[in-house]
């Protein structure tokens, strides 16, 4: 019998009683990258975005603080952004060239959640695309991942994926739910078409403040490390403004827009192993990545898995690997950024764009947020 899997994966217990020796947990998020500048925005807009990022961080932190799973933490964080019309996901998703919303999402774990040991480590993750009715794509991919008996595939799409998700507890809505006036006007303006008449009445509560990013092509995402050492990466998006009908971006492409993996750490040489021991360096044994920006380039360059492989095989830090990846995007003409988290709790938030909505929250519970490229939150 199918279960909705909406409750927390593990009983929420205090980390102090969890038996973990490290007690390390971290959550990082992004809300999209692109042409986000101070010159074209206002302090009122900055405040609105920082408030929304803070709400997302606090939602995920509440899970981690109580000893919950990384999977639950990233779903909580991303759901908060999907429900906020400021971001290009869920309620704030952009329109395709036909004036429709086609959403995408993905989830990937470095190892199965502790509460579901029956899930094979080779399952890795699940992604879904061409979604038109699921209220929170992040919750859909979570439900699919946790029910391998219902879907064995790592990538599903369309109404079949939504119907399967609904049978597992994912909420479906009328496609009109995703409409916002500002995204509609962007869509029509981008095509050089009249902005009015509007297809639906405006919801004044959601239309008072315009987003900073115009004609966006970014996403929202979260990566979390829990007290059991599991890393989960989740990404959700409405795609590119005025994308072709049926276009699939990097968000559901495993290895392009997202990645999470665990491996056995090794030193490249005996001398390096000695240095590691002398300096007390613990090499990362897992990481998670969520990308945002021009997804076509992330696909062509396999950006997310490139970061992972450089850390695993070249002994680079996530900062070095992330810097390489975003510079590689620039060379090819792609704009964007990524959030990266490793098993040691290290954070990197590289970008090649003027801004990226982003945030970090650690064990102290202090949410740190940033918007522009010259700000530092890590």
Image (cartoon, rainbow, N blue to C red):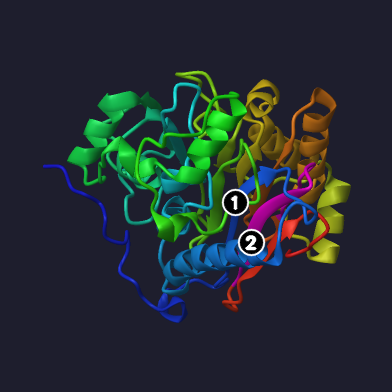
Q: Residues within 10 Å of mark 1 (few under 14, many from 20)?
A: many
Please provide percent x and percent y for residue 195.
51, 33
Q: Residue at x 62, y 30 (%)?
A: 295
Residue linked to disc 2: 45
Q: Residue at x 38, y 56 (%)?
A: 114
Judging depth in this view, the residue of 353 and 75 nearest the camera is 353
Residue linked to disc 1: 211
Above or below, 368 against 272 in this view is: below
Please provide percent x and percent y for residue 28.
60, 58
Please provide percent x and percent y for residue 332.
80, 24
Considering every residue shown, the one lying at the far left of the view is 1
Which residues fall within the magenta stretch? 348-362
Please provide percent x and percent y for residue 306.
70, 32
Above or below, 120 against 228 in this view is: above
Judging depth in this view, the residue of 46 and 347 nearest the camera is 46
Magenta segment includes 256: no
Q: Residue at x 45, y 38 (%)?
A: 105
Q: CA distance from mark 2 to mark 1?
A: 7 Å
In the picture, measured across the screen, residue 3 lies left or right of residue 70, that is: left
> Mark 2 and 1 residues: CB-CB less than 8 Å, in contact?
yes
């Amino acid at each position: 019998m199918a279960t909705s899997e909406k409750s927390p994966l593990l009983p929420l217990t205090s980390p102090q009683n969890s038996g973990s020796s490290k007690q390390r947990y971290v959550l990082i998020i992004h809300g999209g990258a692109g042409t986000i500048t101070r010159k074209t925005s206002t302090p009122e807009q900055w405040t609105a975005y920082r408030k929304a990022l803070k709400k997302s961080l606090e939602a995920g932190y509440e899970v981690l603080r109580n000893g919950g799973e990384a999977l639950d933490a990233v779903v909580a964080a991303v759901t908060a952004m999907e429900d906020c019309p400021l971001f290009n996901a869920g309620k704030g998703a952009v329109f395709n060239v036909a004036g429709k919303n086609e959403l995408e999402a993905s989830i990937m774990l470095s190892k199965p959640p502790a509460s579901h040991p029956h899930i094979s480590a080779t399952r890795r993750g699940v992604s879904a695309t061409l979604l038109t009715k699921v209220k929170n794509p992040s919750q859909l991919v979570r439900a699919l991942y946790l029910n391998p008996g219902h879907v064995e595939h790592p990538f599903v799409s369309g109404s079949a994926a939504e119907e399967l998700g609904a049978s597992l507890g994912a909420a479906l809505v009328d496609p009109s739910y995703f409409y916002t006036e500002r995204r509609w006007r962007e869509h029509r303006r981008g095509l050089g078409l009249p902005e009015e008449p509007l297809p639906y009445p405006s919801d004044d509560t959601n239309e008072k403040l315009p987003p900073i990013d115009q004609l966006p092509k970014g996403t929202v995402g979260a990566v979390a490390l829990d007290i059991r050492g599991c890393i989960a990466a989740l990404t959700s998006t409405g795609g590119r403004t005025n994308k072709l009908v049926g276009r699939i971006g990097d968000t559901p492409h495993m290895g392009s827009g997202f990645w999470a993996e665990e491996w056995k750490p090794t030193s490249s040489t005996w001398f390096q192993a000695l240095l590691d021991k002398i300096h007390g360096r613990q090499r990362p044994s897992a990481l998670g990545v969520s990308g945002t920006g021009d997804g076509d380039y992330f696909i062509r360059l396999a950006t997310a898995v490139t970061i992972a492989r450089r850390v695993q095989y070249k002994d680079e830090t996530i900062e070095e690997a992330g810097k390489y990846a975003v510079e590689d995007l620039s060379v090819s003409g792609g704009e964007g950024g990524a959030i990266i988290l490793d098993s040691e709790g290290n954070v990197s938030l590289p970008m090649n764009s003027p801004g990226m909505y982003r945030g970090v929250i650690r064990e102290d519970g202090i949410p740190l947020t940033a918007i522009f490229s010259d700000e530092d939150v890590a």
